[in-house]
Image (tube, rainbow, N blue to C red):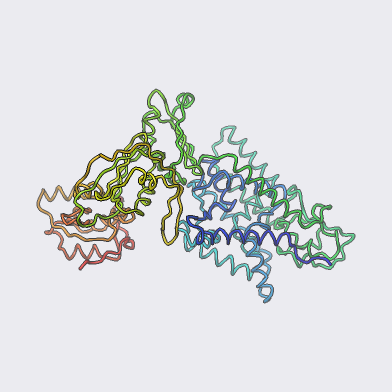
C-alpha cells in the first residue's frame, strides 16, 4: 500500500519541535541553564557572517558554530534547494499545518496575478532592511520582529513589541487564509534562499561588483544588496524558476503518469506538478509530499532515479552533522580591531587572557576595546565570546605584558550585607586569589559569600594573584581550611529572577594574611558607599556660595546600579525647575542612604520640587535645546 505521508520529513519536523520544547522547558527544571534562542537559527549566523565580512565583527553572542551552520545552509540551497525551509524551519512547519485549518474549513485561498506579484516584493524589502541594519550595527535586526525569537524568549528586551505582534498575527492568521503566506511573502530568508537558488545570476552579479571595485569604482556594498534583491524579485515574478541550480529536482515520468492530479493537489506550495516534467519552480522546497502521494511507484522521483523519500531528509541530517563538526573546530573573533601602523603591527607581540566573564557579547567586547584603545603601546584587540578570552596586540618597546594585565584590571568593592546593630568594627583578612580578575568574578564571589554568615564586604586590588580583602564579623573565627572550603568551591548556585543559576568557579587561594587589621563601622560604610553626584555648575556659580535648601528621599535599593543609572535622567527632569542645582546620593549620620535634591529656595518652593520629583512623567533636556517627555523611570513616592 502506497504511503500518503512523507514520514521521514514529518519525523525531522517533529524532532525540531521536540528539541525546541526541550531547550525551552530545560530552563525551568535544570538549575543554571538559560537558552540562547538567537543562536539556534542559521539565519542569525548568516546575518552575523554579513557583519563579519563587512566590519570584521560578529553580531551579539554569535560564534563560529552559527557562522558555519549559516554557510552550510546556503550551500545546501545552491546544491539541493530549500531543504531548510521544508525540513527544519519551525515557522515553515507552522505555516504549512495552520494552512490545513483553512483548507479544512474551505477558507484558504491561493493568491495569483498582480496581487501575488506585489506581495512577493515584501520579503525582498524586508531582506534588504534586515541585512542592512545587521551589517551596520553588528546586531541581529531580525530579533526585532522574528516571531520565533519573540515567543520563545518571552519577548526579550531586544524584541520590538509592535513589530513582533504584527509578525505573529501574519504568521498564524495569514497562514490560515492564504496559502503559505509567511513563506511566500514575508520571510526574508525565503527571499535570500531564492537569490541563492538562482546561483548563476548571484555569482555573476557578485563577480561584476568585485571587478568594478577592483578597477577603482567606489560602490557601497548595500548597492550590491539592493541589486540582488531587485534581480531576485524580477526573476521570481517573471520566470518563477531556477535554471542551473539546485542539482536535485522533482522529476515526473510522463509515460507512467496516470494524470490523476493528486501530486498537484498535495503540493503545499500549490505548484502544478502534474503538468511539469521537471519541477524547477522557485517555491519548490523538495518537501516530497507529491512523491509520497503519487499512486504509481517511480513516476515522481528526485533527479530521475532516486525515489526514496528518506533521501532529502538524509541530506539534511548529514549536512547538520558536518556543520556542527566544522563549527566546533575553530572560533572567529567577535571583534578584531587594529589601530596601530603597518610597521608596528608587523612586529607586534600578542598578550592573551582567558576566563574574562565580562567578554560575553559584541557590546561587552566593544566596551572592553574602548577601555584599552587609547593606552600607549596597544595596537589592536580580538575578543572571543565563546571562551571569554581576548588577544591584545602590543608594542613591547612601549608597554610590557604585566602592564597590560594591570590596565585590564578594575578594582572593585561590594557590600555583601547590611551591618547588624552592635557591630562597631570589622576584621580584615587579605587573600591572594588566582583566577579572579574580571569584575564579574568579584560579583560571583560576593554572591558566594552572601550564602555564609559573617561576611560583610569585599574589596579587590591589583596583584599577582589578585589581592582580595574580606571584611568579616570580628566574632567569627574562620580557619584557613574553612575559608578555602568556602571560596574554592567548584560551583556557585544562586537565585535570580525566580530562576536558579549555576556558575562554575575556579578560585584558588594562593596566599592568606589573617592579621591585616580592622576597620571601624562608619569607615567601612563610607568605604563601601558609591555616591552619585550631578550638578549645574552655572547655577551653583550664580548662587555665589549661598546656603541651599535640600530635600531627602529614602529609596529602597538606591545603591543598586539599576537605580543609579536612571538618576541622570531624573536630574535632567528636575533641572526644568530653575532653582534645582544638584542631585546626589549621600549617607547621613544615621547611616541611611538618601537621594538629596538641593535647590535655591528663592526660585522654587519645596512643594514644587516634590511635585517634579514624584511626577509620573519626566521632561528630559537634550543638547539641541529641545525638551521631550518620557515615562518616569522610577516610581517615587512620599515617605511618611
Against 583, residue 95 (above or below) is below
Hey, which residue is sitting farthest bottom in the picture? 105
- Quick check: can you spot residue 145? no
Against 386, residue 609 (above or below) is below
Hey, which residue is sitting farthest left in the picture? 546
x then y, percent, for residue 273: 78, 61
**Quarter holding the N terminus?**
bottom right
x then y, percent, for residue 187: 60, 58
Q: Quadrant of residue 358?
A: top left
x then y, percent, for residue 423: 21, 53
Q: Is residue 448 left or right of residue 264?
A: left
Q: Quadrant of residue 270?
A: bottom right
Residue sitting nearer the eye, 302 or 244: 302
Residue sitting nearer the eye, 360 or 372: 360
Against 178, residue 349 (above or below) is above
Q: Is residue 621 left or right of residue 378?
A: left
Residue sitting nearer the eye, 122 or 297: 297
Hey, which residue is sitting farthest right in the picture? 255
Q: Is residue 325 left or right of residue 332?
A: right
Q: Quadrant of residue 367?
A: top left
x then y, percent, for residue 543: 12, 51
Q: Residue at x 19, y 64 (%)?
A: 608
What number of labels is visible?
0
**Quarter holding the C terminus?**
bottom left
Q: Residue at x 84, y 66 (%)?
A: 295
Amino acid at each position: 500500500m502506497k504511503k500518503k505521508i512523507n514520514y521521514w520529513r514529518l519525523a525531522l519536523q517533529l524532532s525540531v519541535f521536540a528539541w525546541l520544547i526541550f531547550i525551552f522547558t530545560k530552563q525551568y527544571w535544570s538549575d543554571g541553564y538559560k537558552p540562547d534562542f538567537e543562536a539556534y537559527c542559521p539565519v542569525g549566523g548568516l546575518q552575523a557572517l554579513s557583519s563579519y565580512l563587512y566590519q570584521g565583527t560578529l553580531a551579539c553572542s554569535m560564534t563560529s558554530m552559527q557562522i558555519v551552520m549559516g554557510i552550510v545552509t546556503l550551500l545546501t540551497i545552491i546544491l539541493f534547494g530549500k531543504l531548510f525551509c521544508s525540513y527544519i524551519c519551525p515557522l515553515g512547519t507552522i505555516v504549512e499545518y495552520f494552512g490545513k485549518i483553512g483548507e479544512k474549513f474551505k477558507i484558504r485561498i491561493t493568491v495569483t496575478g498582480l496581487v501575488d506579484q506585489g506581495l512577493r516584493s515584501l520579503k525582498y524589502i524586508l531582506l534588504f532592511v534586515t541585512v542592512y541594519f545587521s551589517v551596520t550595527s553588528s546586531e541581529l535586526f531580525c530579533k526585532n520582529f522574528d516571531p520565533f525569537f519573540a515567543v520563545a524568549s518571552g519577548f526579550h528586551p531586544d524584541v520590538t513589541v509592535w513589530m513582533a505582534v504584527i509578525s505573529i498575527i501574519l504568521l498564524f492568521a495569514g497562514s490560515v487564509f492564504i496559502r503559505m503566506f509567511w513563506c511566500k511573502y514575508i520571510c526574508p530568508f525565503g527571499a535570500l534562499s531564492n537569490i541563492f537558488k538562482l546561483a548563476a545570476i548571484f555569482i555573476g552579479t557578485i563577480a561584476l561588483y568585485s571587478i568594478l571595485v577592483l578597477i577603482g569604482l567606489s560602490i557601497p556594498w548595500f548597492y550590491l544588496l539592493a541589486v540582488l534583491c531587485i534581480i531576485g524579485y524580477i526573476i521570481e515574478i517573471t520566470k518563477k524558476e531556477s535554471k542551473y541550480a539546485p542539482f536535485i529536482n522533482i522529476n515526473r515520468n510522463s509515460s507512467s503518469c496516470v494524470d490523476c492530479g493528486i501530486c498537484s493537489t498535495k503540493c503545499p506550495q500549490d505548484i502544478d506538478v502534474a503538468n511539469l516534467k521537471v519541477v524547477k519552480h522557485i517555491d519548490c522546497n523538495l518537501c516530497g509530499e507529491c512523491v509520497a502521494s503519487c499512486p504509481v511507484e517511480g513516476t515522481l522521483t528526485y533527479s530521475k532515479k532516486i525515489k526514496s523519500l528518506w533521501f532529502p531528509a538524509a541530506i539534511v541530517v548529514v549536512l547538520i552533522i558536518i556543520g556542527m563538526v566544522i563549527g566546533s573546530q575553530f572560533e572567529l573573533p567577535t571583534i578584531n580591531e587594529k589601530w596601530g601602523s603597518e610597521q608596528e603591527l608587523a612586529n607586534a607581540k600578542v598578550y592573551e587572557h582567558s576566563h574574562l566573564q565580562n567578554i560575553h557579547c559584541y557590546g561587552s567586547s566593544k566596551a572592553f576595546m574602548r577601555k584599552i584603545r587609547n593606552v600607549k603601546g596597544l595596537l589592536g584587540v580580538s575578543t572571543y565570546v565563546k571562551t571569554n578570552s581576548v588577544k591584545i596586540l602590543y608594542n613591547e618597546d612601549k608597554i610590557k605584558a604585566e602592564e597590560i594585565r594591570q590596565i585590564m584590571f578594575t578594582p572593585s568593592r561590594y557590600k555583601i550585607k547590611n551591618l547588624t546593630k552592635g557591630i562597631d568594627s570589622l576584621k580584615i583578612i587579605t587573600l591572594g586569589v588566582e583566577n579572579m580578575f574580571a569584575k564579574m568574578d568579584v560579583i560571583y564571589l560576593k554572591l558566594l559569600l552572601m550564602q555564609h554568615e559573617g561576611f560583610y564586604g569585599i574589596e579587590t586590588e591589583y596583584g599577582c594573584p589578585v589581592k582580595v580583602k574580606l571584611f568579616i564579623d570580628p566574632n567569627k573565627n574562620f580557619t584557613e581550611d574553612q575559608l578555602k572550603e568556602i571560596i574554592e568551591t567548584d560551583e556557585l548556585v544562586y537565585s535570580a529572577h525566580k530562576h536558579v543559576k549555576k556558575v562554575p568557579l575556579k578560585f584558588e587561594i594562593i596566599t592568606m594574611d589573617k592579621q591585616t587589621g580592622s576597620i571601624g563601622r562608619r569607615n567601612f560604610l563610607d568605604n563601601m558607599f558609591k555616591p552619585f553626584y550631578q550638578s549645574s555648575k552655572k547655577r551653583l556659580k550664580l548662587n555665589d556660595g549661598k546656603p541651599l535648601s535640600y530635600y531627602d528621599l529614602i529609596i529602597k535599593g538606591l545603591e543598586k546600579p539599576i537605580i543609579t543609572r536612571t538618576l541622570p535622567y531624573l536630574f535632567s527632569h528636575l533641572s526644568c525647575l530653575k532653582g534645582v542645582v544638584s542631585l546626589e546620593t549621600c549617607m547621613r549620620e544615621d547611616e541611611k542612604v538618601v537621594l538629596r535634591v538641593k535647590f535655591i529656595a528663592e526660585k522654587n518652593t519645596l512643594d514644587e520640587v516634590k511635585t517634579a520629583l514624584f511626577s509620573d512623567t519626566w521632561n528630559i533636556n537634550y543638547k539641541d535645546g529641545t525638551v521631550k517627555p518620557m515615562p518616569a523611570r522610577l516610581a517615587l513616592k512620599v515617605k511618611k
